[in-house]
């Protein structure tokens, strides 16, 4: 069974405790997009990265989901020096007098063994903010969040005087864009580790401010602003770079795929060792019921409550098949398939199914990757499965603990499986 959880933007760190029995997760990260400049350039899109990473049960990993950059919006008072904050997790800011650019989008990342920037193992870069233009259409676009390199922000398309910030790389932040002015506050600032540079700020109500750089492994540089000494429109901020550490597997990086807030989707396959094939008939107080149709709160066994039915995939390539009547007359009363480690009770002894294989009436059969099931009760019990005494899932089994302590606790029904 595959379990999946989506982490959406909250503006905060989100810790996650790896459940028992899980040693690898698949993740997909989307960086956030940059904001649009006021009547000007469009914000760059966030990057996408997918990978498999090895984890340890019981360890805490930390998810940081990037927030979208904010759009530069015309102000009622152009004489007001404003600041437009960047998106959560590294987006560079924009602002100043006149018309503001868009701020940079934040990166999305995963951290292990701590929550500092140097604990990041996967990063999807955010997009740079667009430069502003009150006339519309010629402010530079922000660069997209990148793969190994963020995309450069565009220069202003009116005069070309204002330069876009460059994208972040694997070694350093993007360089802030400059203009023809000697006023350094109108230049974009450089990006740095985890942080996009700020857009250049104009000091005039009639000119335009640059876009902020996108967050990333290294952030993009901010775009330059225009002013009386460097006329034209503002430039866009560079996109942040993405990153995957060397232990990640099956890594795929894509530049500029996501618009809006970032996201992280985590999934893992829940392994199983003790289970029955579907349509195994279980003797309940209401008669024989196919195991996959049994329900907590409805069915009982010898007056004892069923906590739930687990539904999982098996890790191995073979199962054990007991032919009808192989143990005794009408025991089992039909062919019965179970996992190799599942115990059958013979004269009070618990014997694993694989130890009973004789290649005649008890054989190994291929596992076709269908769902397998088991019964979880308060205690470790014996049930009749196809009239054959077999064990239920032990309450301390890793799978039992995973279902009790995480899957069912987090809103998944005890009577309905998760999606395949």
Image: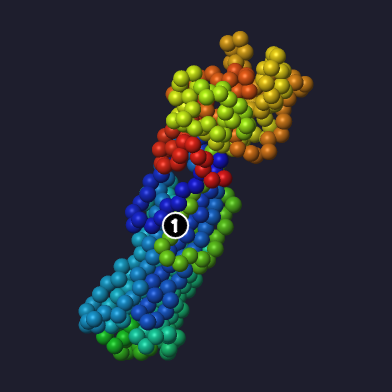
Q: Would you place residue 275 above or below residue 302 in this image?
A: below
Residue 333 position in % (x across, y down): 67, 21
Identify the residue shown where x is 49% and y is 32%.
295
Identify the residue shown where x is 40% and y is 38%.
409
The residue carrying pointer 1 sits among few (fewer than 14), some (14 to 19) or many (20 or more) residues within 10 Å by Cα, namely many
Residue 60 position in % (x across, y down): 41, 42
Number of residue marks: 1
Q: Would you place residue 389 above or below residue 89 in this image?
A: above
Q: Which residue is mark 1?
A: 263
Q: Would you place residue 91 above or below residue 209 in this image?
A: above
Query: Element type at marker 1?
Result: strand
Tell which residue pokes out farthest to the front in this image: 286
Image quadrant occupied by the C terminus:
top right
Identify the residue shown where x is 55% and y is 60%.
253
Q: Would you place residue 331 above or below residue 37 in this image?
A: above
Seen in the image, is 292 located left or right of residue 13?
Answer: right
Tell which residue pokes out farthest to the right in this image: 360
Identify the residue shown where x is 30% and y is 75%.
95
Residue 325 position in % (x across, y down): 71, 18
In front: 376, or 158?
376
Residue 49 appears in the picture as rendered? yes
């Amino acid at each position: 069974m595959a379990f999946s959880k989506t982490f959406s933007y909250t503006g905060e760190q989100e810790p996650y405790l790896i459940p028992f029995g899980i040693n690898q997760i698949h993740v997909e990260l989307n960086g956030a997009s940059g904001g649009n400049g006021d009547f000007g350039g469009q914000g760059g899109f966030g990057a996408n990265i997918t990978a498999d990473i090895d984890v340890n049960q019981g360890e805490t990993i930390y998810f940081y989901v990037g927030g979208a950059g904010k759009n530069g919006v015309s102000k009622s008072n152009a004489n007001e020096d404003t600041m437009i904050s960047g998106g959560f997790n590294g987006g560079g800011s924009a602002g100043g007098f006149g018309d503001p650019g868009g701020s940079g989008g934040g990166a999305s990342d995963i951290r292990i063994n701590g929550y500092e920037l140097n604990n990041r193992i996967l990063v999807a870069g955010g997009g740079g903010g667009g430069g502003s233009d009150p006339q519309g259409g010629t402010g530079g676009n922000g660069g997209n969040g990148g793969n190994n390199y963020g995309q450069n922000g565009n220069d202003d398309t009116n005069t070309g005087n204002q330069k876009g910030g460059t994208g972040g790389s694997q070694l350093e932040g993007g360089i802030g864009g400059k203009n023809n002015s000697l006023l350094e506050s109108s230049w974009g600032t450089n990006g740095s580790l985890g942080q996009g540079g700020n857009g250049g700020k104009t000091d005039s109500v009639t000119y335009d401010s640059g876009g902020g750089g996108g967050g990333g492994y290294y952030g993009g540089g901010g775009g330059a602003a225009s002013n009386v000494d460097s006329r034209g429109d503002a430039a866009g901020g560079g996109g942040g770079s993405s990153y995957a550490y060397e232990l990640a597997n099956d890594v795929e990086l894509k530049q500029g795929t996501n618009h809006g807030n970032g996201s992280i989707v985590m999934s893992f396959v829940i392994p199983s060792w003790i289970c029955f094939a579907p349509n195994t008939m279980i003797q309940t107080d209401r008669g024989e019921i196919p195991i996959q149709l049994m329900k907590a709160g409805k069915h009982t066994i010898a007056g004892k409550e069923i906590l739930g039915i687990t539904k999982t995939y098996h890790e191995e390539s073979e199962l054990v098949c007991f032919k009808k009547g192989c143990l005794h007359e009408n025991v089992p009363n039909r062919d019965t398939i179970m996992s190799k480690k599942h115990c059958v009770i013979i004269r009070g002894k618990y014997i694993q199914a694989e130890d009973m294989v004789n290649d005649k009436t008890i054989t190994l059969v291929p596992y076709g990757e269908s769902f397998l099931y088991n019964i979880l009760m308060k205690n470790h019990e014996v049930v009749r499965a196809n009239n054959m005494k077999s064990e239920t899932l032990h309450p301390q089994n890793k799978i039992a603990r995973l279902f009790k302590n995480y899957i069912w606790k987090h809103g998944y029904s005890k009577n309905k499986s998760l999606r395949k």
